[in-house]
Amino acid sequence: MRKKIITSILAASVIGATAIAGTSLIQASGDNVADSKYTSNETLPANLKYDSDHPDEIHVKDHGVFVKVDSNKIDYNKEEVVNDVQKVTDDTSVIVAYDATYIKQSDWK
């Protein structure tokens, strides 16, 4: 009778230890799933590629092309100024956004 109890306790201990060890291994292998240094060799979409080639310009569809300028050279009293690219209209001459000043260079083509 005493051998049965010792054998049962030993079997339960082995099963419990195996379950705990298996869980620890699963959690350890799950930490390395995402690699933060992954880089893609895919090309940029056309609209992002165009914008990345012209970082000093803002192209607003149907309203024009705005070029980055020195803000000290602009007379703000005579110009329509917006501080958000989404608020640009046909009459807008100056955009103050992205920590820079942009003046209208040409109409949208």
Image (tube, helix red, strand yellow):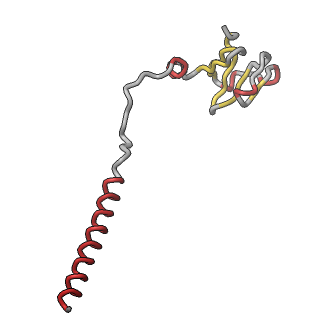
Answer with left or right where residue 69 lies relative to residue 30: right
Q: Quadrant of residue 26?
A: bottom left
For the C terminus, the image quarter is top right
- Between 77 and 30, the residue placed more toward the observer is 30
Answer with left or right where residue 37 lies relative to residue 104: left
**Rendered view: 15 above or below 6:** above
Residue 38 at x, y = what percent? 36, 37
* Residue extending farthest bottom: 2
Residue at (47% x, 22% y) in the render: 44
* Residue extending farthest top: 109
Residue at (78% x, 16% y) in the render: 90
- Between 73 and 102, the residue placed more toward the observer is 102
**Rendered view: 22 above or below 89:** below
Residue 7 at x, y = what percent? 20, 82
- Between 27 and 105, the residue placed more toward the observer is 27
**Rendered view: 39 above or below 56:** below
**Rendered view: 65 above or below 37:** above
Residue 61 at x, y = what percent? 68, 17
* Residue extending farthest right: 77
For the N terminus, the image quarter is bottom left
